[in-house]
Amino acid sequence: MFLVHWILNWLLSALALWLVAQIIPGIHIRSFGTALVATVVLGLVDITIGPVLRFIAFPITFLTVGLFQWVLKAFLLKLASLFTPGFRIDGFLNALLGALVLTIIDIALRHVAWATL
Protein backbone atom coordinates (compact mmCIF):
# COMPACT_ATOMS: atom_id res chain seq x y z
CA MET A 1 0.00 0.00 0.00
CA PHE A 2 2.89 2.35 0.76
CA LEU A 3 4.27 2.01 -2.77
CA VAL A 4 0.88 2.78 -4.32
CA HIS A 5 0.59 5.88 -2.11
CA TRP A 6 4.10 7.01 -3.08
CA ILE A 7 3.53 6.49 -6.82
CA LEU A 8 0.15 8.24 -6.73
CA ASN A 9 1.67 11.23 -4.93
CA TRP A 10 4.47 11.37 -7.51
CA LEU A 11 2.01 11.27 -10.42
CA LEU A 12 -0.20 13.93 -8.81
CA SER A 13 2.79 16.20 -8.20
CA ALA A 14 3.94 15.77 -11.80
CA LEU A 15 0.42 16.52 -13.04
CA ALA A 16 0.31 19.63 -10.88
CA LEU A 17 3.67 20.80 -12.25
CA TRP A 18 2.55 20.11 -15.83
CA LEU A 19 -0.69 22.07 -15.23
CA VAL A 20 1.30 25.00 -13.82
CA ALA A 21 3.36 25.03 -17.01
CA GLN A 22 0.13 25.14 -19.04
CA ILE A 23 -1.26 28.03 -16.96
CA ILE A 24 1.78 30.27 -16.51
CA PRO A 25 3.41 31.43 -19.77
CA GLY A 26 6.88 31.81 -18.20
CA ILE A 27 7.14 28.17 -17.14
CA HIS A 28 7.92 25.62 -19.84
CA ILE A 29 7.87 21.83 -19.63
CA ARG A 30 8.53 19.78 -22.76
CA SER A 31 6.27 16.82 -21.88
CA PHE A 32 4.61 14.97 -19.04
CA GLY A 33 7.68 12.72 -18.88
CA THR A 34 9.77 15.80 -18.24
CA ALA A 35 7.31 16.77 -15.50
CA LEU A 36 7.83 13.36 -13.89
CA VAL A 37 11.62 13.85 -13.91
CA ALA A 38 11.30 17.47 -12.73
CA THR A 39 9.17 16.33 -9.81
CA VAL A 40 11.89 13.92 -8.70
CA VAL A 41 14.56 16.62 -9.11
CA LEU A 42 12.42 19.10 -7.18
CA GLY A 43 12.03 16.56 -4.38
CA LEU A 44 15.78 15.94 -4.27
CA VAL A 45 16.55 19.67 -4.24
CA ASP A 46 13.98 20.20 -1.49
CA ILE A 47 15.41 17.34 0.61
CA THR A 48 19.07 18.37 0.25
CA ILE A 49 19.11 22.17 0.05
CA GLY A 50 15.70 23.01 1.50
CA PRO A 51 16.43 22.34 5.19
CA VAL A 52 19.60 24.44 5.10
CA LEU A 53 17.77 27.35 3.46
CA ARG A 54 14.83 27.08 5.88
CA PHE A 55 17.24 27.11 8.83
CA ILE A 56 19.15 30.14 7.54
CA ALA A 57 15.95 31.97 6.60
CA PHE A 58 14.11 31.22 9.85
CA PRO A 59 14.41 34.76 11.27
CA ILE A 60 12.94 36.41 8.17
CA THR A 61 10.32 33.66 7.87
CA PHE A 62 9.34 34.35 11.48
CA LEU A 63 9.14 38.10 10.86
CA THR A 64 7.00 37.64 7.74
CA VAL A 65 4.71 35.16 9.53
CA GLY A 66 5.74 32.36 7.18
CA LEU A 67 5.32 34.22 3.87
CA PHE A 68 9.04 33.95 3.15
CA GLN A 69 8.49 30.20 2.74
CA TRP A 70 6.82 31.11 -0.56
CA VAL A 71 10.06 32.80 -1.71
CA LEU A 72 12.07 29.74 -0.65
CA LYS A 73 9.72 27.43 -2.58
CA ALA A 74 10.11 29.66 -5.64
CA PHE A 75 13.90 29.54 -5.32
CA LEU A 76 13.89 25.75 -5.01
CA LEU A 77 11.56 25.48 -8.02
CA LYS A 78 13.85 27.70 -10.08
CA LEU A 79 16.88 25.70 -8.91
CA ALA A 80 15.22 22.42 -9.89
CA SER A 81 14.52 23.85 -13.34
CA LEU A 82 18.25 24.49 -13.79
CA PHE A 83 19.00 20.79 -13.22
CA THR A 84 16.19 19.37 -15.39
CA PRO A 85 16.51 19.33 -19.18
CA GLY A 86 13.22 20.34 -20.80
CA PHE A 87 12.05 22.32 -17.76
CA ARG A 88 12.61 26.09 -17.87
CA ILE A 89 11.40 29.02 -15.79
CA ASP A 90 11.84 32.49 -17.28
CA GLY A 91 12.65 34.79 -14.37
CA PHE A 92 12.09 34.72 -10.64
CA LEU A 93 8.63 36.32 -10.78
CA ASN A 94 7.40 33.38 -12.81
CA ALA A 95 8.95 31.08 -10.20
CA LEU A 96 7.09 32.98 -7.44
CA LEU A 97 3.79 32.72 -9.27
CA GLY A 98 4.54 29.11 -10.17
CA ALA A 99 5.25 28.19 -6.55
CA LEU A 100 1.94 29.68 -5.46
CA VAL A 101 -0.12 28.07 -8.23
CA LEU A 102 1.74 24.75 -7.81
CA THR A 103 0.85 24.64 -4.13
CA ILE A 104 -2.81 25.39 -4.80
CA ILE A 105 -3.13 22.84 -7.62
CA ASP A 106 -1.20 20.20 -5.68
CA ILE A 107 -3.47 20.58 -2.65
CA ALA A 108 -6.58 20.43 -4.84
CA LEU A 109 -5.43 17.34 -6.73
CA ARG A 110 -4.48 15.49 -3.57
CA HIS A 111 -7.80 16.39 -1.96
CA VAL A 112 -9.76 15.05 -4.93
CA ALA A 113 -7.60 11.93 -5.32
CA TRP A 114 -7.64 10.90 -1.68
CA ALA A 115 -11.32 11.73 -1.26
CA THR A 116 -12.20 9.28 -4.03
CA LEU A 117 -10.01 6.43 -2.74
Image (cartoon, rainbow, N blue to C red):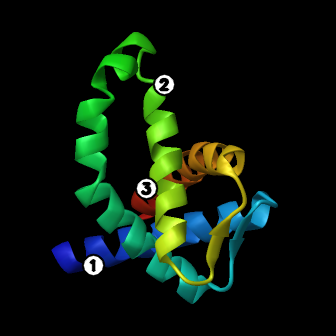
Label whose residue precedes the other's in the sequence (2 or 3): 2
Residue 116: horizontal and vertical position, in percent? 45, 62
Left or right position of 71 against 21:
left
Q: Amino acid at mark 1?
A: Val
Q: Nearer the viewer, residue 39 or 82?
A: 82
Q: How far apart are labels 2 and 1 at the CA level?
A: 33 Å
Which numbered marker is on residue 77?
none
Badge 2 element: loop
Residue 79: horizontal and vertical position, in percent? 48, 60
**Placement of the C terminus among the 4 image quadrants:** bottom left
Q: Find disc 2 in the rendering and name its residue.
A: 67
Residue at 48% from the left image edge and 24% from the top image edge: 67
Q: Nearer the viewer, residue 25 or 85?
A: 85
Q: Nearer the viewer, residue 35 or 77?
A: 77
Q: How far apart are labels 1 and 3 at the CA level?
A: 15 Å
Is residue 85 depicted above or below 102 in this figure? below
Label whose residue precedes the other's in the sequence (2 or 1): 1
Residue 42: horizontal and vertical position, in percent? 41, 65
* Residue contact between numbered discs 2 and 1, judged by CB atoms under 8 Å: no
Which numbered marker is on residue 115?
3
Residue depth check, mark 2 versus mark 1: number of the one nearer the observer: 2
Quadrant in which residue 85 is drawn: bottom right
Badge 1 element: helix
Residue at 82% from the left image edge and 61% from the top image edge: 25
